[in-house]
Amino acid sequence: MAAAMRAYQEIGFAGAMRPDHVPQLLGEDDGEPGYTMLGRLFAWGYMRGLMQAVVGCQ
């Protein structure tokens, strides 16, 4: 995922991104496999952190 974020940064990608098939976290209700709410929030934070790290490495 970090390599993908670097590649997106290098080509100037400015489109939308969304997590897909997120992890199910401990204590989370059984929801639609791969699309649970807490897992989705975790994935958003992970993606945002990677984006910030890539921008900071320039």
Image (cartoon, rainbow, N blue to C red):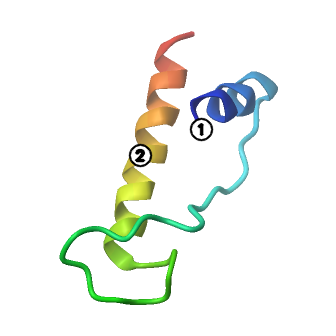
Is 31 in front, or is 10? 31
Is residue 48 shown above or below 7? below
Q: Position of residue 26 (x, y in %)?
A: 22, 70
| Tag 1–tag 2 contact (CB < 8 Å) | yes
Question: In the rendered view, would you say 6 is above or below 8?
Answer: above
Residue that lies at the very extreme toward the right in this rendered image? 11
Disc 2, SS: helix
Residue kind at label 1, given as amino acid type: Met
Residue at x-position 40% and y-position 37%? 49
Which quadrant, please, contains the C terminus?
Answer: top right
The answer to which of marks 1 and 2 sits earlier in the sequence is 1
Query: Which quadrant of the figure contains the N terminus?
Result: top right
Relative horizontal placement of residue 4, taking residue 47 as reference (left or right): right
| Residue at the image position 52 percent from the left and 34 percent from the top | 51
Q: Amino acid at mark 2?
A: Tyr
The residue to which callout 1 is attached is 1
Q: Residue at x 37, y 50 (%)?
A: 45
Mark 1 and mark 2: Cα distance apart in space: 10 Å
Residue found 42% across the figure and 64% down from its top = 23
Q: Is residue 54 above or below residue 21?
A: above
The dot on residue 46 is 2
Q: Is residue 10 above or below residue 37?
A: above
Secondary structure at badge 1 equals loop
Give the class, few, some or many, for how many residues have Cα within 10 Å of label 1's Cα (few <14, many ≥20).
few
Instruction: Identify the image quadrant of residue 4.
Output: top right
Number of labelled discs? 2
